[in-house]
Every structure is written in C-alpha cells, then in structure tokens.
Image (cartoon, rainbow, N blue to C red):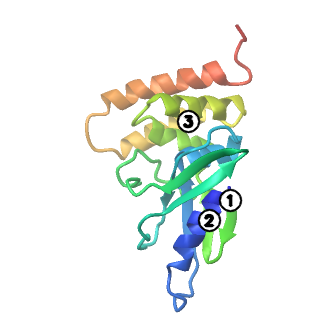
Amino acid sequence: MDAVDDLIGRIERSIPASFTRRLTAYLVGGVAVHVYTSWRVSKDMGIHFPQRIIIPPGLVKIYDDQGQERSLAYDYNYGSFIALMHPDCWDNAWEGWSVGRIDVRVVSPTDLCVPKVGRWPGNDKEDICALAASGLLDADTIEQRCLKALDCYVGDTTMLQYNLRGLLEEIAKCSPSAPQA
C-alpha cells in the first residue's frame, strides 16, 4: 500500500496550502480488492474524488515488490459517471486511512462487484472469486445492489443482466461454502 499512499500523497501535495479543507478519495477496482484480500496486485489505481480536483500529470510509482519491479499508475481513464454504480456506494465505503489532507475510503466488497457487471473480463472474474473466497460477498445482497444500480442506468441492460447471472455463479463457485470438486 506504500505505492498507493505515495500517489495519493503526490496528489495531496499538489493542492495549494491555502486550501485547508479535507478531501475524500474512494479507492475502487483492483487496488480496493487488494485492500480486502491482499490477492491481486493492480497496475493502475482507480479513485473517485467527489470534489472537483486537478490531478497532476504523470502519476506513476515504480517500486520493489519482494524483489520484483512493479509499477502503479493513476488511472486517468476511470470515471464513476460511466461505470455501473449503486447510488449509495460512497456512503457504504470503509473508512480507511488518511494521507495528509486526503481521507482515503475503500468501496465495500459488495459495491466493488456492481461495476464489474458492466465489463466482466477475466480480471473482474478473478477479483470476484478472491472476494468470495475471502467470505466477503453475499450473492443475494449483491444481486439487490446490482438491480438497484440497473434501475438508475439508461440504455439496454440485457447484457448487464446476463453478466449479473455470471457474477452470481462466480460467487457461488468461489465462496467458502461452495462444494469442493
């Protein structure tokens, strides 16, 4: 998490000292999954800032991970406004830690699943499995959160509903109570 703190610290230091209020940053995606499971090491850091903030260019941290060189880059392409999100996901986030004037929150495991319904590539399936294997997911709760999020979505939701079925099957397959083959 040192790389995450380094990037957030660089954002915090770019804010003028005359700005005295605290900011909130919500971690999403692979970095958030890593916070909960210590499983996947993400190459990019998705963050939602509810405040309007100018992010400095070129935010990348090169670091050593047990003898292996890795990098973590700020994901300039992430935008919560285009992802499928439950309207209350920010309110349900885990209160994590602070880096200077930025309070870091981590989107809940349940709410991390909701945007994955909109994409559903391999790493999303692996993230769901890691969260489910850690006992952090309840399929019924996730289904309700996704359906509520879909109510707020504009457009044809057929593919998303299909992906939701796949997500629920993945949870059933990977949860600690799943029958072992």
Residue at disc 1, secondary structure: helix
Q: Which mark is residue 177?
A: none
Check whether the beta carbons of the residues at disc 3 and disc 1 lie within 8 A of each other.
no
Of the pair 125 and 10, the residue shown nearer to us:
10
Task: Report helix, strand or loop for mark 2.
Answer: helix
Nearer the observer, 129 or 169: 129
Q: Quick one: which residue is furthest to the top in this view? A: 181
Label 3: state its secondary structure. Answer: helix
Please indicate, yes or no, whether residue 151 appears anywhere in the rendered image.
yes
Which image quarter: residue 139? Answer: top right
Residue 142 on image: x %, y %: 55, 36
Contact (CB < 8 A) between labels 2 and 1? yes
Image position of 77 with respect to 54: above or below: above
Q: Which residue is mark 2?
A: 6
Return the mark for residue 142.
3
The answer to which of marks 2 and 3 sits earlier in the sequence is: 2
**Is the residue marked by circle 3 packed among few (<14), some (14-19), or many (20+) residues within 10 Å?**
many
- Residues at marks 2 and 3, CA–CA distance in whole angstroms: 32 Å
Q: Confirm whether residue 89 shows in the render.
A: no
- Name the quarter where the N terminus is drawn: bottom right
User: How far across and down, in percent of the image, does residue 8 sit?
Assistant: 57, 66
3 or 1: tag closer to the N-terminus: 1
Please give the label number shown on residue 2. Answer: 1
> Residue at the location (51% across, 34% down)?
124
Residue type at numbered disc 2? Asp
- Residues at marks 2 and 3 touching, judged by CB atoms closer than 8 Å: no
Residue type marked 1 = Asp
